[in-house]
Image: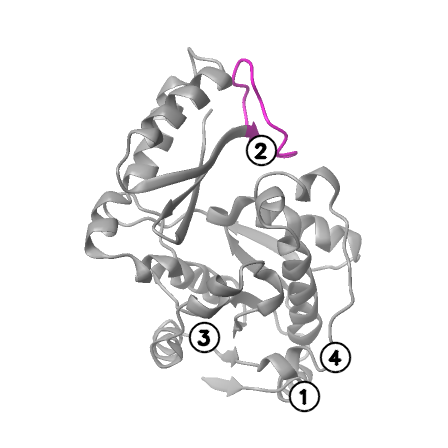
Amino acid sequence: MLIFKTKREVFEFITTNAGKRIGFVPTMGALHQGHISLVRRSVAENDITAVSIFVNPIQFNNPADLEKYPRNIDSDIALLENAGVDLVFVPSVEEMYPDAPTETYDFGELGSVMEGAFRPGHFNGVAVVVRRLFDIVQPTKAYFGEKDYQQLLIIRELVKQINSHVEIIACPIDRENDGLARSSRNLRLTDEMRRTAPFIYQQLLKARSMAVNHTAQEIKEIIEKSFEEHPLLKLEYFTIADGQTLQSIDGAVPENAYAFVVAFAGDIRLIDNIRLI
């Protein structure tokens, strides 16, 4: 497995392997089995699998969140090597942003709701780094997890806007045995928080069970009340929205509706979603 820190090294490797199918998994490190499930799919579908590890500072609107984001580069490298990765790109901030980035993207209503509303500037930062990584790695396919569902739709829209030929592959949420969605931020949970965190997925399952005979507004009120009564988890938002436009739904739950939830365990922000019908 090759480990590169500069764009030039990656460019030379890609040039040498021209014509081969390249699968790409962009990450911010602190890898878990959810990431590895993306990697394994890439290994199965491509000639070469590349992974980037880069904690992108411009997608954090909360400096404390950036500072506390877990970093485990040695264990990350070991996991990737065991999974059959060919190339790992581990750039510095200076390598990715030799000058302050000035690119701006407009994703319309898709980027203004949910995470876009609660994390101003987040998706522009994601779009900037993903486009730069695509330009460097030149992948045939790029793999993204459905846990960050809104991000997945944003990346698909980005590819359209920049006329990229990269095929975006959506991969199912990978969960622990108790239902908690795997996340790098789970590493920061205390034992007590970790025991109670599956409550988030349980509420999503409850929402799905109610989708046939309750309106979206009724489900929302029930789930919000459940979180109000929880001693450790503080709800940031729960919404039911169309799976393509992400516009909120209040009435009868239609096909392709999703429930989206974000809750805090202390200062640790946990995100999850589920398709309802």
Badge 1 amino acid: Arg
Residue at 71% x, 82% y: name it: 98
Q: Position of residue 253 (x, y in %)?
A: 52, 18
The amino acid type of the residue labelled 3 equals Val
Q: Nearer the viewer, mark 1 or mark 3?
A: 1
- Residue where numbered disc 4 is placed: 99
Q: From the top left corner, tell me how far across and down residue 223 is, in percent.
A: 38, 26
Calculate the distance from the C-alpha at mark 3 to the C-alpha at mark 2: 32 Å
Residue indicated by mark 1: 8
Magenta region: 241-256
Overall secondary structure of the magenta section: loop
**Residue 211 location, x and y as percent?**
43, 18
Residue, x 69% and y 70% (percent of image)? 132
> Which callout, 4 or 1, points at the residue further toward the start of the chain?
1
Q: Is 136 located above or below residue 9 in the figure?
A: above
Q: Secondary structure at mark 1?
A: helix
